[in-house]
Amino acid sequence: MNRYLFILGRKADLAFAELQTVLHRISKLQPAIIKKFNETVIVETDSTLDGQELMRSLGGTVKIVRLGEPVNSQQFLDYLVNILRNETIGKGKIVFGLSIVGSRDPRQIRLIPRTLKDKLDKEGIPSRYVLPKQGNELTSAQIVLGKVTELYLFSHDHILDIGKTIAAQDFEGFSMRDYGRPYVSPQAGMLPPKVARMMVNLAWEKPPEKDQWLLDPFCGTGTIAMEAMMLGINSLSSDQSPEQVKGTQDNLEWLGKQTHSDASWKVLQAEAVKVSHSLVGPVEAVVTEPYLGPRKPVREKIPNLVKGLDKLYLGALKEWRKILLPGKRVVMVLPEFDVGGLVKKADLIIDRCENVGYTLVAGPLAYERPQAEIKRQIFVLKRKEAIPDGKNQTVGKNNTAQAASRKTPGS
C-alpha cells in the first residue's frame, strides 16, 4: 500500500474538494482511501502516484509527501537519518529541513534537525539544515529555491508518520500568471490564479477530452481561461466589455507563447445572458466569476444590489442551460457582502437551481481575503436532463444533439 500526505492551502475545504475531484478522475487510484485532518490529507492506494505530474494539475495543494509505514517514538530518528542517508548517495553535501504537523511538541522543530545533523556528521556525511521561517513547516519557496530535502513528521490518531516531500506547488508560475500578464483590470475583479485553477478542476468529473470546451461568460481578464490552458483544456471566453475581450485575448496570446500549450481558445464579445446567440455548439463546462457588484459596496445599497445580482445570476443560469450538455457542471462564484455589520448573500439561485434545471453538487466553498467586504462563495451545480415543467429545453442551433458533431462552440 502506497501512502501520501497532501498539504493543503489556507482554504482547506476548497482545496480538499478540488483534490477529491482530481483523484476521482484518476482511474488507477480507484479505490483509494482518503482521510482528512484539518489542512492535511492522507491518501492510501495500491497505485504509485507521480507527485510532480499531479502537482502540475492542482491549485489548492501546497506539497505532496511520500509516507513510509507508521513508526513509534523510539524509531523515528533512525528512520529520518536513513531517509537522509539515501538522499546523499551520489551527492555531496545535503541540505535538509523538517516540518511538523499534528500534535507533537513544536519545540522539536529546532531540536530534531540538530540531532540529525550530529548523527550524519558521525557518519562523515556533510549536511546543513534549514528551519521554517515561521510556524512549524517550511514554505514551498524555501524547499524549491533552497533545493532543500524536506522531511515531514505527522502525528495523528496516536500514529507517527514520517515522509519526504516529493512535489511542491509552482508558486513562481502562479505568481507569473497573476502579476506578469500584460493586461490587468482591478475593475474586472482580481480572481487569484490558484482559485481559478481549483474551479476549473471542480468542473470535470472525468478527464477532459481534446475536443471538449469550457465556457467563461464573465471572462474579465481571462484568468479562468489561462488556468484552463495550463491544464490543456479548450476555452471559450466572453464578456460584454470590448476592453475585457481585448485584454483577455492579449493575456491568452501571451500565455500561449510562454507555455506552447496546444489548447484551443476563443474570445467573444457577448452578454452572459445572451451568450447562446454567439455559439454554434455545446460546451462541457461553465466556470466563471460573474459580476459581483462594485468594489466598494455602500451598506445602504446592498439589499437592492443583491436583488439585482440574484436576477442577473438566475437569468444567466437559464441561458447557460441552452448550451451546457446534460450532466455537466457549472462552477461559479457568488458574493457574500459584509459591510458595517450587515451580512448579505446573493445566492437566491441556489434555492431555485432545481427549478431551472440544476442540482447542487458542492458549496458554499469559501475563499476570501482577510477583512474583505466582498467574500467569494464557490458553488458547483450540475445540469439536469430535464426540468419539472419541461420548459427551458435546449433549442435551435445550440441543441445538445450537436455534441456528436463536436463543432467548435465559438462562431
Image: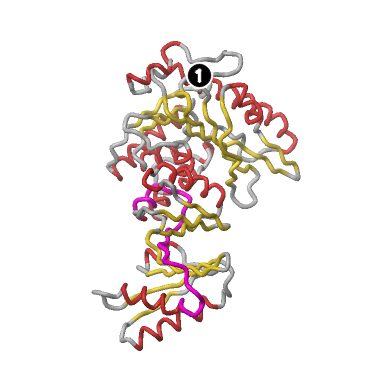
Residue farthest to the bottom? 122
**Residue 334: percent from left, percent from top:** 60, 36
Residue under label 1: 274
Q: From which residue to which does the magenta span run?
A: 52-76
User: In the figure, 122 relative to 54: above or below?
Assistant: below
Residue farthest to the top? 396
Which quadrant is the N terminus positioned in?
bottom left
- Name the residue at 53% across, 39% down: 189
Which quadrant is the C terminus positioned in?
top left
- Name the residue at 75% across, 41% down: 342
**Residue 301: percent from left, percent from top:** 72, 33
Count of labels in the image: 1
**Residue 288: percent from left, percent from top:** 50, 34
User: In the figure, 180 relative to 164: above or below?
Assistant: above
**Residue 317 is one of the magenta-drawn residues:** no
**Residue 127: percent from left, percent from top:** 35, 80
**Residue 53 is one of the magenta-drawn residues:** yes
Q: Looking at the rendering, which quadrant does residue 126 occupy?
A: bottom left
Query: Dot 1, crowdedness within 10 Å: few (<14), some or many (≥20)?
Result: some
User: In the figure, 294 relative to 135: above or below?
Assistant: above
For the residue pair 125 and 260, the one nearer the viewer reads as: 125
Residue type highlighted by circle 1: Lys
Residue farthest to the left? 90
Horizontally, residue 167 falls left or right of residue 334, namely left
Identify the element where label 1 is drawn: loop
